Amino acid sequence: MNDNLWIDVKIPYEPGCLLADAYNRSMENTLAEWVLFLDHDLFICNPFWYDMCLDAIKQLKDKKVGWISAKCNRLSCDEQKYQGKTDNNDIINHIETAKGLYNKKGNLLTKTDAILSGFFILTNKTAWKAVGGFKDMNKNIFGVDNEYKRDLTKGGFDLYIMEGLYFYHLYRQKAKAFKGFKCQKA
């Protein structure tokens, strides 16, 4: 791995809720080997997040890595969910949580076989090409991440969680926060 390592950061979108198409288009059009996909309802709480991602890639340079993820407050995947008290919507509280977790865990990586949630997908072109990209889930955004994880696992790629990197995720609070916004089907 050379010193010119960089990560292309994307918030994927495709009209008609075609999330797999957005992911695949991003992978096809980037010059970077590594791409980070972030959910649109994710709030960055750690100013060192990008450097932590670079460090994770460097730590795993000799491994067959398909996906590196992080921690957040709301999620159905227990391995990615921070287990402390984070049920409020006070962003300052979440920044403090991120700081505490960063100071405690730093750049610790944990290998996992969990069904990861796609709020934070740090992946690479090598793995993406090997598994045939992200699969269309019949014009539905749900399950694209789960299918990608299954394909990576079948392809022999490892998955990791960055234990010290925490984000505030609106997640199921979106119904209240984004009331009136609806996905327009193509």
Image (cartoon, rainbow, N blue to C red):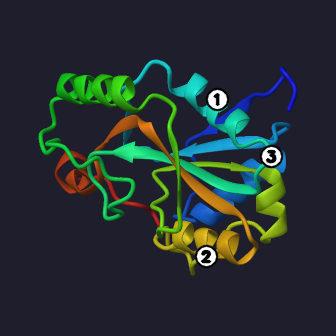
* Residue 180 place in picture, x, y as percent: 24, 53
Residue 5 in picture, x, y percent from top left: 79, 27
Mark 1 surroundings: few (<14), some (14-19) or many (≥20) residues within 10 A: some
Left or right: 95 in relation to 109:
left
- Is 83 left, or right, of 44 in this rendering? left
In the displayed structure, would residue 110 be above or below residue 78?
above
* Nearer to me, 15 or 6: 6
Which one is earlier in the sequence, the residue at label 3 or at label 2? 3
Whether residue 39 is situated above or below residue 21 in the rendered picture:
above
For marks 3 and 1 on the same chain, the one whose residue lies earlier in the sequence: 1
Depth order, front residue of 12/81: 81
57 left or right of 99?
A: right
At 41% from the left and 61% from the top, the residue drawn is 183
Element assignment for label 3: loop
For badge 2, the amino acid type reads: Arg
Disc with the residue nearer the chain's start (2 vs 1): 1
Q: Whole-Å distance between the Cαs marked 2 and 1?
A: 25 Å
Q: Marks 2 and 1: CB-CB under 8 Å?
A: no
Q: Quadrant of the N terminus?
A: top right
Q: Is residue 160 above or below residue 4?
A: below
Q: Is residue 186 visible?
A: no
Q: Are marks 3 and 1 in contact (CB under 8 Å)?
A: no
* Identity of the residue furthest to the bottom in this view: 138
Q: In the image, what residue type sits under mark 1?
A: Asp
Secondary structure found at label 2: helix
Q: Which numbered marker is on residue 135?
A: none
Q: Nearer the viewer, residue 5 or 16?
A: 5
Badge number at residue 62: 3
The residue where tag 2 is placed is 150
